[in-house]
Image (spheres, helix red, strand yellow):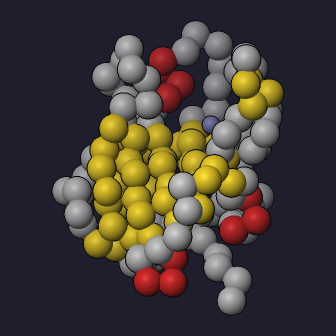
Amino acid sequence: MKHTFVAPNSDGLIRKCDASGCGHFGANRIGHKHNGVDFVVIPNQNIYAPFPCIINRYGYPYSGDLNYRLIEIIGTGAYQAYRAKIMYVNEVLPVKSRLDKGDALCTADDITKKYDTPMTPHVHFELYINNKLVDPTKYFNVK
Ligand SMILES: [Zn+2]
């Protein structure tokens, strides 16, 4: 059975290249490769559960800047091998909340405020299967 995910931003639009970088998996970043996919958002919009899951924890993507949060979810049922981190989000639901695929999970923050160079507002999505980082692109209907 092929698993498919709901896009966190609902429409699957991926960040194109802007002055700060490109949104696809493997894009060049300073000193490393982009390890996720950036989905274009309007700040404060709903972010949706890509697969049935439980909220495992909230964390901080930047150790030196506690203004930004990440949410970590773990799949349930047929999706239990999957774990994902979505960053630059606002907390809405408590840890251990259980969601179905497509349920409203959290809301988007505005990552563009952190940087001086122009950047498309986005959330960053990272996928792990059995704790190994993978390219999540094929699970989505991306645009
Ligand atoms: Zn990213």
The quadrant where residue 9 appears: bottom right
Q: Residue at x 59, y 62 (%)?
A: 129
Q: Is residue 102 shown to the viewer in this render?
A: no
The residue at the far bottom in this view is: 1
Q: Residue at x 38, y 48 (%)?
A: 71
In this rendering, the answer to whether 40 lies above or below 8 is: above
The residue at the far left in this view is: 94
In which quadrant of the rendered image does the C terminus lie?
bottom right
In this rendering, the answer to whether 36 lies above or below 12 is: above
Q: Residue at x 40, y 41 (%)?
A: 70
Q: Position of residue 5 (x, y in %)?
A: 60, 71
- Figure quadrant, ligand 1: top right
Q: Residue at x 32, y 60 (%)?
A: 55
Q: Position of residue 123 (x, y in %)?
A: 53, 43
Q: Is residue 64 shown to the viewer in this render?
A: yes
Q: Is residue 64 left or right of residue 119?
A: left
Q: Position of residue 77 (x, y in %)?
A: 44, 83
In which quadrant of the rendered image does the N terminus lie?
bottom right
Query: Which of 62 and 110 lies nearest the eye of the viewer?
Result: 62
Query: Which of 71 and 131 lies nearest the eye of the viewer?
Result: 131
